[in-house]
Image (spheres, rainbow, N blue to C red):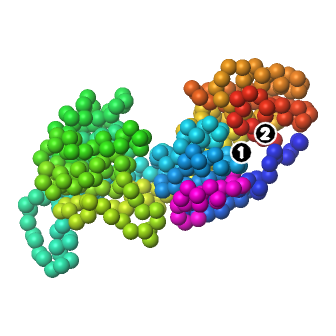
């Protein structure tokens, strides 16, 4: 047992979908793992077939990992979302199988923020419509409808990693910033928190949405919210497609209530670049539509690839669950001078007592032990001396409530 990995890295299979940046492939392969890649997303049945014998899955935003997919994934240990959101993954079902899920919550924030600033300027100056007119030979040199950012009020809905960074850049350009968030957030610079969404909508010249993709946020922006915005105000949605009712937005734009909008995300998006796109927002004046490119810069995709790959390697090589979104977070050093037992279990009475009984019966000398739990799952890590009977560890797999057992040497 001494000096040998519990399972050879070269036999741990990884499947990366949706054209994930080569930096991730390079880092994982250099660590000794077997990596297979595919350009597009897979539907449920194809994903089930592709996951046979696969230990690690990497996706972006278009592949849905459902409870049914997880039920058929016979070897799956971890999922990496090479993006910010994880709403495309059934996190509860993954936790129930002891499958760790990681994402990259900060790596593309700058790219999204820069696009939001650029789109706001473009909308303020009516650049898209003027450019389109030029392409058909129309010269429309006029200041009518063109405004500066300086002195305007930006209302940010959702003051997390992206919203707060947008706040700083917008203020540097001379904008006045207000924000609304359902949780307590530290205001940066001169930004001011508004206690109600309605109050923000009534005050903002530009409303930028940066909320997460939870199901409860579906259609939180519709006709009622557009009616409360300042006449002629601008709307940006670079967060999640299902949070805005696009039919209501089209009506608000058509009536002139909303002076312009930029939408980067949609309730239904093509699975690949070859699939057609359709939306009621197409063809509207001062409407900018972009194909979910908020975080799609070369710098951001490389940073996401490196961050998510590092999280996977930390989990596979030493059991580290830092930044895991569905299991208790435990930060661990490398395994030195012993073997590491990793045990994920349901958070129920008696598990630790039974684990300790089995460890005592096996005569294992524990060098270190870590336990972290949340409301549904427990994760215990035990470093033990190498001098033990490997057969004795089989009993740890049968402890009531066990979801996953791993051994690192």
Residue tagged by mark 1? 317
Q: Is residue 321 visible to us here?
A: no
**Is residue 41 one of those drawn in magenta?**
yes
Q: Identify the residue shown where x is 12% and y is 47%.
A: 231
In front: 271, or 162?
271
Position of 269 with respect to 193 (left or right) is right
State the separation of the CA atoms marked 2 and 1.
10 Å
- Sequence-wise, the earlier of marks 2 and 1 is 1
Q: Identify the residue shown where x is 65% and y is 55%.
A: 51
Q: Position of residue 114 (x, y in %)?
A: 34, 54
Residue tagged by mark 2? 407
Label 2: which secondary element: strand
Position of 361 with respect to 28 (left or right) is right
Secondary structure mostly taken by the magenta-highlighted segment of the chain: loop
74 vs 43: above or below: above
Q: Position of residue 154 (x, y in %)?
A: 23, 44
Q: Position of residue 79 (x, y in %)?
A: 60, 48
**Is residue 359 one of those drawn in magenta?**
no
Question: Could you tell me which quadrant the N terminus lies in?
Answer: top right
Q: Identify the residue shown where x is 49% and y is 45%.
A: 86
Residue contact at pointers 2 and 1, CB within 8 angstroms: no
Label 1: which secondary element: helix
Q: Identify the residue shown where x is 84% and y is 35%.
A: 394
Q: Which residues are magenta?
A: 38-55
Q: Residues within 10 Å of mark 1 (few under 14, many from 20)?
A: some
The image shows a total of numbered marks equal to 2
């Amino acid at each position: 047992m001494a000096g040998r990995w519990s399972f050879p890295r070269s036999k741990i299979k990884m499947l990366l979908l949706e054209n994930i940046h080569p930096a991730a492939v390079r880092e994982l392969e250099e660590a000794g793992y077997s990596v297979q890649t595919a350009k597009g997303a897979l539907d449920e049945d194809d994903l089930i077939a592709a996951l046979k014998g696969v230990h690690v899955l990497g996706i972006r935003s278009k592949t849905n990992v459902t409870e049914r997919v997880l039920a058929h994934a016979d070897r799956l240990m971890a999922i990496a979302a090479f993006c910010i959101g994880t709403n495309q993954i059934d996190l509860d079902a993954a936790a129930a199988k002891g499958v760790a899920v990681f994402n990259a919550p900060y790596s593309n924030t700058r790219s999204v923020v820069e696009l939001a600033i650029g789109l706001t300027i473009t909308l303020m100056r009516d650049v898209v419509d003027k450019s389109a007119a030029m392409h058909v030979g129309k010269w429309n040199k006029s200041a009518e409808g063109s405004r500066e950012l300086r002195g305007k009020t930006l209302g940010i809905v959702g003051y997390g990693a992206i919203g707060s960074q947008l706040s700083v850049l917008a203020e540097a350009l001379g904008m006045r910033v207000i924000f609304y968030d359902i949780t307590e957030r530290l205001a940066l610079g001169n930004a001011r928190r508004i206690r109600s969404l309605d109050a923000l909508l009534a005050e903002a010249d530009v409303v930028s949405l940066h909320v997460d993709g939870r199901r409860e946020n579906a259609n939180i922006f519709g006709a009622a919210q557009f009616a409360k915005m300042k006449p002629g105000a601008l709307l940006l949605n670079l967060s999640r497609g299902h949070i805005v009712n696009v039919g209501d937005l089209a009506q608000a734009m058509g009536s002139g209530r909303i002076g312009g909008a930029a939408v980067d995300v949609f309730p239904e998006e093509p699975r690949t670049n070859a699939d057609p796109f359709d939306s009621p927002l197409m063809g509207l004046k001062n409407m900018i539509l972009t194909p979910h490119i908020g975080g799609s810069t070369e710098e951001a995709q490389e940073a996401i690839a490196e961050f998510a790959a590092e999280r996977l390697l930390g989990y596979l090589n030493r059991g580290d669950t830092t930044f895991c979104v569905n299991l208790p977070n435990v930060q661990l050093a490398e395994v030195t001078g012993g073997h590491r037992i990793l045990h994920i279990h349901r958070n129920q009475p008696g598990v630790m007592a039974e684990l300790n009984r089995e460890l005592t019966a096996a005569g294992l000398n524990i060098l270190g032990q870590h336990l972290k739990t949340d409301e549904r799952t427990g994760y215990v890590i035990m470093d033990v001396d190498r001098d033990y009977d490997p057969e004795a560890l089989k009993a740890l797999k049968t402890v009531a409530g066990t979801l996953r057992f791993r051994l690192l040497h």
